[in-house]
Image: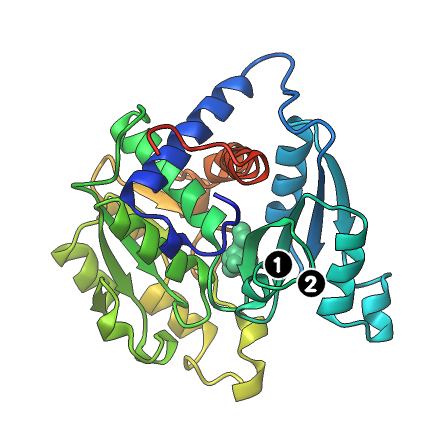
Amino acid sequence: MKHLLSAADLGHDQAVAVLDVAEEMAATQAREIKKLPTLRGKTVVNLFFEDSTRTRISFETAAKRLSADVINFSPKGSSVSKGESLKDTVLTLGAMHTDGIVVRHPASGAPYQIAHSTWTDASVINAGDGTHQHPTQSLLDAMTIRRRLKGGQAGQDLSGLAVMIVGDVLHSRVARSGVDLFTALGAKVTLVAPATLLPVGVEAWPAEVFHDLDRALAEAPPDALMMLRVQRERMSSAGGGFFPSPQEYAREYGLDAPRLAALAPHALVMHPGPMNRGLEITSEAADGARSVIVEQVANGVAVRMAVLYLTLTGAKEPGA
Ligand code: NCD
């Protein structure tokens, strides 16, 4: 594959193949020397127009483990603060013969614009665009679930598993990518949110929707329970008003001790980070025995190594 723009672009077989490569990458990360020569001589630019901790560091780590040269770009301290456009920024990168551009942007669609432009012929990897897509996040989530609940062997998908995504679906590119990828991999997906935090048209998504978390946990018990961050930075234009108060949100939609106790013994607790502890998830749940939140971060490096390898070398996924 040349680019990775959306989880929806990955069909079942291709998604399984990417996860298989990610498992191979993960195996190399258990060695004493973690660096592979795979992308030696290639240059990857991390073009992050939005704040990020784990995604940016994860892509940087992944590219470096594959021996690529990595340039981290943030608009602060660059000519973007002087008003330079996305086009001119990318043209500049193109002129420097960049091989891969990992882009995070507040505008949904920005990575598409770059990938389908004549500004650069680099591979473009979407690291989160607005409220639209975050494909590597859903791949690392799928890898975590597959490993934990299916043993992680090559060729496996998520069939027979139920994934529940709870919270601020409206603003979440993680939820959109997750619904696309998990259903492609054969999982059943349930969304739980107040009506104010669901997008228009959610009925058409391949997911069952609940407004009551306790009812959802009883009627559609999840194998993996994914809590979403309440994205307050995307709520400013409406002046809030998406829920009555943080206390009420935590009471209705937060993962607390009684809800944790209601889960099946094997069920996983997930969160893409950064967490609002005490709002969508209690520390007890986040740090408890079922939590795989730190594992998600670790798997992120392996998934991004796989995606950088497949896009930048033009390698065929096994079986493709
Ligand atoms: C997510 C994001 O930025 O979309 N975080 C991440 O990449 N790990 C989710 C979020 O910000 O809530």
Residue 258: % across, % down:
28, 52
Q: Is residue 115 left or right of residue 320?
A: right
Specify the color scheme. Answer: rainbow
**Vertical position of residue 184 compared to residue 241: above or below:** above
To which residue does mark 1 refer? 104
For residue 181, side relative to residue 276 (left or right)? left
Label 2 CA crowd tier, 10 Å (few <14, some 14–19, many 20+):
some
* Front position in the image: 286 or 58: 58
Q: Earlier in the sequence, mark 2 or mark 1?
A: 2
Tag count: 2
State the SS at label 1: strand
Disc 2 to disc 1: CB gap under 8 Å: yes
Q: Residue at coordinates 65% horizontally, 52% vertically from top-left?
A: 121
Along the viewing direction, whichever of 108 and 271 lies nearer the viewer: 108
Q: Residue furthest top?
A: 32
For badge 2, the amino acid type reads Phe
In the image, residue 78 sits, relative to residue 184, either above or below, namely below
**Residue beneath disc 2:** 49
Residue ID at (34%, 61%): 166
Q: Position of residue 56 (x, y in %)?
A: 65, 47
On the question of residue 211 being in view, the answer is no
Q: Is residue 35 shown left or right of residue 12?
A: right
Image point (47%, 34%), residue name: 295
263 or 62, which is in the foreground?
Answer: 62
The image quarter in which residue 233 lies:
bottom right
Q: Nearer the viewer, residue 4 or 127?
A: 4
Residue 81 on image: x %, y %? 84, 71
**Which mark is on residue 304?**
none
